[in-house]
Amino acid sequence: MSRLERTIVQWSVLTLIVALACMLTGQQSLAEAIPQRASPPMDQAVPVMPTTIEVWFSEAIDPDGTTLTVLKQDGTQVDLGDTTVDAQDATGTRVSISVHPGLDNGVYLVEWTARSAVDGSTASGQYQFTVDPTASPEPLPQIVAQDAPVGRPDAGESEDQDESGRSPVFYGVAATIAVLAFVTVLTLWYFRRAARGRRWSDRPVDRL
């Protein structure tokens, strides 16, 4: 193998390693635990203030480093500080906190910090809900949108995945790796063929 061929191979291998590292890092960032639904529902109104605020996350939660905080619109904290990860929940995704009884109607803010029990990553964000006596009763649990955590995409963007749970980023990087591998093989084939042609042209010609 010539020096040029070795250089091409080295740069190709380095590029593949960098691409793989980016793909793995991207997959880990997508694995952070974010709220999927809540009671009361995120960004909706309920007629009565419940005694407990509940949030279901996208993956199992580590109790250490996971907190919920409930605030009135003026910033007054109204929770009892008893953030709990439901040990009876088989998925480990339900987190709850109690609030003081007899709270007024109005807008409330829920701030959350969640540490994933899967990979230890931490995410944080917030959402609102409103207590309004004229509102309809709370609907059945469903996935709803919420405010995005700072520096991260909206939770709704986590739905941009196929049935296998992989995002478009995964397939984009995989396609890039495949193209780089193909170009590397094609380049090596070209240089080997060119070198073989030069060897044949350098052979002495037998004269009659």
Image (spheres, rainbow, N blue to C red):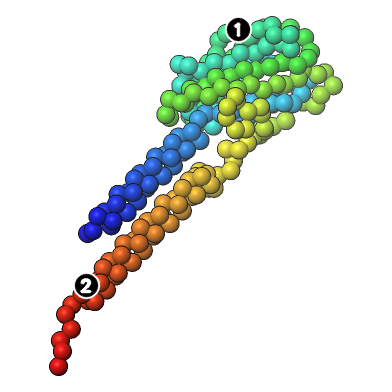
2 vs 1, front mark: 2
Residue that badge 2 annotates: 199
Q: Residues within 10 Å of mark 2 (few under 14, many from 20)?
A: few
- Inter-mark Cα distance, 2 to 1: 83 Å
Of 173 and 138, nearer the camera is 173
Q: Is residue 180 above or below residue 167?
A: below
Residue 95 visible to an observer of this rendering:
no
> Which residue sits at x=43%, y=25%?
120
Q: Residue 1: x, y in percent? A: 22, 59
Question: In the image, 80: left or right of 131?
Answer: left
Q: Amino acid at mark 2?
A: Arg
Left/right placement of residue 41 relative to residue 13 reads right
Q: Are marks 2 and 1 in contact (CB under 8 Å)?
A: no
Q: Quadrant of residue 45?
A: top right
Q: Residue at x 69, y 8 (%)?
A: 75
Give the image location of residue 76, x and y in percent. Answer: 69, 6
- Between residue 68 and residue 153, name the one nearer to us: 153
Three-letter amino acid code of the residue under disc 1: Leu
Residue lying furthest bottom in this view?
208
Q: Which residue is depicted at the point 54% across and 15% down? A: 67
Q: Is residue 17 above or below residue 182?
A: above
Label 1 secondary element: loop
Can you give x and y, in whole percent of width and height, for residue 94 in the image? 55, 24
Pointer 2 or 1: first along the chain: 1
Circle on res. 80 = 1
Given residues 188 and 131, the one toward you in this image is: 188
User: Picture coordinates of residue 96 (x, y %)?
Assistant: 58, 18
- Is residue 64 shown left or right of residue 100? left
Q: Quadrant of residue 126?
A: top right
